[in-house]
Amino acid sequence: QKLSFEELKEMSISVLLQEIFLRHLIWRSKVMKAAMEGKIPQVERDYTKCLLGQLLSNIDIIEDPELKRILEKIYEPHKKVHTSLDDYEAFVREKNPDSKERI
């Protein structure tokens, strides 16, 4: 669920980080389950739409310089994790051209 900039600003950073962590664990679990079944996972690929992506796109709301520095470092790895599903889907479709599942 996409949050507005105002909603992001109003959340305590502690709650926000816990929610980000939880949502990514669920995302990862769905990806792993689909991979084990040879399917295409039904998860968000756009790294700017997940909660972490929304926070990274609005990084200036972070007041703690150390936390901001850490979050800036994870931008590219976070992007790569989400977009790597394009490669995975291509692999699945190559092995199973009749696959109708789509993210």
Image (cartoon, grey):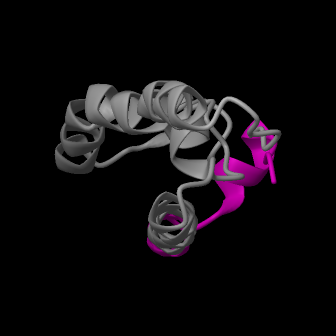
Query: In the visual, does 37 lie left or right of 76?
Result: right
Q: Look at the magenta stretch and give its main secondary structure.
A: helix
Q: Is residue 12 above or below residue 40?
A: below
Q: Nearer the viewer, residue 100 or 29?
A: 100
Give the residue displayed 50% in from the left and 71% down from the top.
29
Tell me residue 10's x, y (percent). Answer: 69, 58
Quarter of the image with the N terminus in it: bottom right
Residue 15 visible in the snapshot: yes
In magenta stretch: residue 53: no
Quarter of the figure with residue 75 = top left
Query: In the visual, does 103 lie left or right of 52?
Result: right
Quarter of the image with the C terminus in it: top right
Q: Which residues are magenta?
A: 1-20
Tell me residue 26's x, y (percent). Answer: 56, 72
In magenta stretch: residue 6: yes
Q: Nearer the viewer, residue 95 or 100?
A: 95
Tell me residue 32's x, y (percent). Answer: 45, 65
